Amino acid sequence: MSVHEQFAEDLALLALGSLEGDERQVLERHLQECAACRRELEALRGDMALLSLSTAGPKPPGRSRERLMAAIAREPRRASARRWWWMLAPSLAAAGLALMVVLLGRQNSGLREQIAGMQSDAAAQQVELRRAREIVSTLTTSDAMRVTLVAAKTAPQPQGKAIYVRDRSSLIFIASNLPAAPPQKAYELWLIPSSGAPIPAGVFKPDVHGSAAVVNPPLPVGVEAKAFALTIEPEAGSTTPTMPIVMLGAGE
Amino acid sequence: MSPAEPRAGLSDAALVAAIRSGKESAMAELYDRYSAVVYSVSLRVLGDTGAAEDVLQEVFLQLWRNPDLFDSSRGNLAPWLAVIARNRSIDGLRKRRPESDVEDVLLSVEPDMAGDADRAMAMTKVRTVLGGMPAAQRSALEMAYFEGLSHSEIAAKTGEPLGTVKTRIRTGLLALRKAFQT
C-alpha cells in the first residue's frame, strides 16, 4: 500500500485515538486529500478490532439480552423503514426543488425566446399594418387627389376599379367622375358570381368631386366573381339589382 | 470458547437490513452472535461488569436506532461493534463525554466473523500472534488499545523513547494484519 511513510506511525495512533494536537491536525488535513492513507487508517482500525478478540471469553448475563430487547420494544418505531425513508425526505425534497429550479429555468428561457419571437413578429406585423393602412387611406381618403388619365381630348368618363381577392373575401372599389346620385338614391355595387344571383357589395354616394370608395363590404366567403356592376338603388340599398346597370366590368 | 457448529444464518448485511425495517428478531440474532465480543472488550477496558453491561446495551441500541451507520460493504459487523464498544468504554474510563462519533468509525477487516467457528478461529489466531510478540510490544499495544493511553503516556509509564513506542504500536498492528492475510 502506497501510504505516505511520514504518516505511517501517526496513522496507527490516530486509529487508536491517541494522536493529539498539531500532529493530529496535520494528519487529518492530509487524510482529506489522500485516499491511500484513508484506506490504511481503515485497515489499521480493522487490525485493532482484532485485538478485541483476544479478550473474548466472558459472556454477558442473560438479563442483558432481556434488557436490550425490552428497551428496543419501548423505542418509538424510529428504526423502521418508515423512519429510514423519512430521513431521506429532506434530501428528496431538496432534489425535487433543484429539479424544479432547472425545469422552471428551462421553461423560463423557452418562454423568453417565445416572447422575443412574438415581439419581432408583432413588430413586423405593425410595419405591414402601417403600410396597408397607408395604401387604404391613400386609396380612400377624401383629401386624395384622384387623376384619371384618358386619351387626350376626351371628356372625363365615370370610372370604377374593383380589386377583389376571393380567398379573403376582400374587396376594394374606387370610383371617380361619378355623377351625383338622384335624391333619396345611392349607388350600389354588385358582385356578379360565376353562377347565381348578384350579391350586394356595398351602398355609397360619391363626394362632390364624383369620387367614392367601398372597402371590404360584408361578402360571403370564397365566391368566384365573374364581374362587378353598379346600379342606382334606394339609399338603404336593395337585395336585387334594379335595372339599368350604370357600370359593368368583368375580371381580366 | 469451544468451537461451535458453523451457523447457517443470515449474513450480517441481511440482518442489518432487517433491523432497518424494524425487525426485532434480527436484532436478537445479532445480539446472540456478537454480544460476547462487545461485552468482553468493554469488560476488559472497564473492569466492571455493570459498566460493561451498560456499554453493551448502548452499543446495540445505537445499532437499532441507526443501522445505516454500519457500512456492510467494508466488512462484517463484529469488528465494527468491537471498536465502537472499545471507544465507548475508553470514554467511560476517562470520564469524558463520548468524543468519538460512531459515524467516524470506518474500518475494514479481512476475516469473516459471522459464524461462531470463524470467530473462534480468529480469536485463537489473535492470541497466538500476541503470545508470540515481544512483551514490551504486546504491552504497548494493550495499553494503547485497552487502557486508551496515548503514546506519550505509554512512553512516560515505560520510560521508553516516544519513537520506540510509536513504532511498536504500528508494527504490532501490522503483525496482526499479516497473520490474517493468507
Image (cartoon, rainbow, N blue to C red):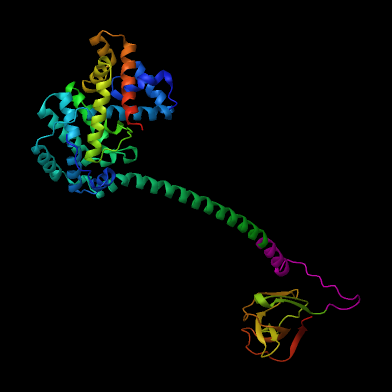
How far from the left and from the top, in percent, is residue B157?
A: 23, 10
The quarter of the rendered structure image containing the N terminus of chain A is top left
Q: Is residue A202 above or below residue A22?
A: below
How far from the left and from the top, in percent, is residue A145?
A: 77, 67
User: Which residues make up the magenta segment?
Assistant: A129-156
- Image quadrant of residue A195? bottom right
Magenta-span inclusion, residue A45: no
Q: Is residue B143 above or below residue A175?
A: above
Drawn side of residue A223 relative to residue A209, left or right: left
A42, A93: nearer the viewer: A42
Q: Is residue B157 above or below residue B107?
A: above
B157, A205: nearer the viewer: B157
Q: Does residue B100 appear in this view?
A: no
How far from the left and from the top, in percent, is residue A107?
A: 49, 53
Q: Residue furthest top?
A: B159
How far from the left and from the top, in percent, is residue A191?
A: 69, 84
At horizontal 28% and vertical 41% (from top left) the residue drawn is B68
Q: Residue furthest right?
A: A153
The quarter of the rendered structure image containing the C terminus of chain A is bottom right
Q: Does residue B141 appear in this view?
A: yes
